[in-house]
Image (cartoon, rainbow, N blue to C red):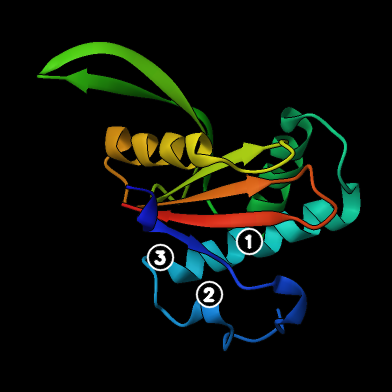
Amino acid sequence: MMNNIKPLRSLKTQNLTTDNTEYTENKYPFSEITDKIIRCAIEVHKTLGPGFIESIYEQALIHELKQAGLKVNQQVSTKIIYKNINVGEHRLDLLVNDAVVVENKTVKEFDDFHQAQVLSYLKASGKKIGLLINFAKRKIDVKRVIL
């Protein structure tokens, strides 16, 4: 199940001003949107740095995403269905352009749980791609999760 995780190459070595980087070559669903989200997250991290709680980064990221012309829904309620029965609900951190689930974290390292969590959110929401973003490290950490 974890083999669906697509780590990004080091963003430090990529030219972020062109569309010729690995993550914008339409190798992934919604590459144009995820590219913009990643750029916005990098801007938030460059400006704030590590050390704040998730909600601070979430608010800053929402601002950047809207400035970039993206539609952002925050804390989107998603029903969890088990054998045709609603067994509860969960909230997605962000849903961008009704297509990309964004899960913000401030953790020392990503682990299998974080990646499984995003996969579960994708299944529950019917979306195909998510971004897992860790703002807690000195260098921002972004992983694509594809259903």
Q: Is residue 74 above or below residue 8?
A: above
Q: Amino acid at mark 2?
A: Tyr
Query: At x 65% / y 86%, what residue is drawn?
Result: 18
Where does residue 48 sit, x and y in percent of width and height?
89, 47
Residue 67 in the figure: left or right of residue 114: right
Element at label 1: helix
Q: Which mark is residue 30?
A: 3
Q: Amino acid at mark 1?
A: Ile
Residues at marks 3 and 1, CA–CA distance in whole angstroms: 12 Å
Give the quadrant of residue 104: top right
53 and 69: which one is in front? 53
Where does residue 44 sit, x and y in percent of width and height?
79, 52
Query: At x 60% / y 58%, what residue is drawn?
Result: 37
Give the quadrant of residue 39: bottom right
Task: Indicate which disc, 1 or 2, sits on the residue closer to the N terminus.
Answer: 2
For label 2, the crowd category at 10 Å Cα-Cα, with few meaning under 14, some 14 to 19 and many 20 or more, is many
Query: At x 73% / y 36%, what residue is drawn?
Result: 106
Element at label 3: loop
Q: Which residue is mark 1?
A: 38
Q: Which mark is residue 130?
A: none
Residue 124 in the figure: left or right of residue 10: left
Where does residue 60 sit, x and y in percent of width and height?
76, 42
Asked if the residue under mark 2 is in contact with the one under mark 1, i.e. CB atoms within 8 Å, the reply is yes
For label 3, the crowd category at 10 Å Cα-Cα, with few meaning under 14, some 14 to 19 and many 20 or more, is some
Where does residue 45 sit, x and y in percent of width and height?
81, 52
Q: Which residue is mark 2?
A: 23
Give the quadrant of residue 13: bottom right
